[in-house]
Image: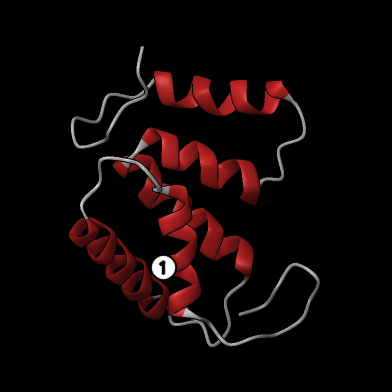
């Protein structure tokens, strides 16, 4: 994996699991669904055929999966991954979510 600063490090599945668990903390998502999502992400990365993959690509793939699973976890992950600095950063992501209708996703409370 190629980090944003150009450094190369091995992909760490456990680190992926930990970051997802942090994003999903206190959310009504079963551990089995998290494991299924991690496996799907890893398969997607492996099937890409790339010898090295950027951390940005991994982050985008993770966000796609979180977006379809849980709104709050998606916003949490996005806020760290995209380095949110202001309330308008959150507003933009919330605007994206409010325009979607996916019955599998755990929505934000309204």
Q: Which residue reaches farthest front? A: 26
Query: Residue sitting at 72 percent across and 45 percent down?
Result: 83
Query: Residue sitting at 43 percent across and 82 percent down?
Result: 49
Residue 31 image position (x, y, % from top left):
23, 59
Q: Give the quadrant of the N terminus.
A: bottom right
Disc count in the image? 1
Q: Is mark 1 on a helix, strand or loop?
A: helix
**Residue 88 location, quadrant:** top right
Residue 41 image position (x, y, % from top left):
36, 66
Query: Residue sitting at 43 percent across and 26 percent down?
Result: 97
Q: In this view, does 8 lie above or below 61?
A: below
Q: Is residue 87 above or below residue 35?
A: above
Q: Which residue reaches farthest right? A: 5
Query: Residue sitting at 81 percent across and 71 percent down?
Result: 5
Residue annotated with mark 1: 17
Q: Is residue 53 above or below residue 17?
A: below
């Amino acid at each position: 994996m190629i980090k944003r600063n150009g450094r190369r490090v091995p992909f760490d599945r456990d680190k992926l699991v930990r970051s997802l668990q942090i994003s999903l903390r206190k959310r009504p998502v079963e551990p089995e669904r998290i494991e299924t999502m991690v496996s799907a992400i890893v398969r997607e990365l492996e099937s890409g055929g790339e010898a090295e993959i950027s951390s940005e690509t991994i982050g985008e793939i993770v966000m796609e999966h979180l977006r379809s699973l849980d709104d709050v976890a998606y916003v949490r992950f996005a806020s760290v991954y995209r380095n949110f600095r202001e309330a308008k950063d959150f507003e933009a992501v919330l605007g994206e979510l409010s325009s979607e209708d996916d019955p599998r996703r755990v929505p934000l409370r309204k």
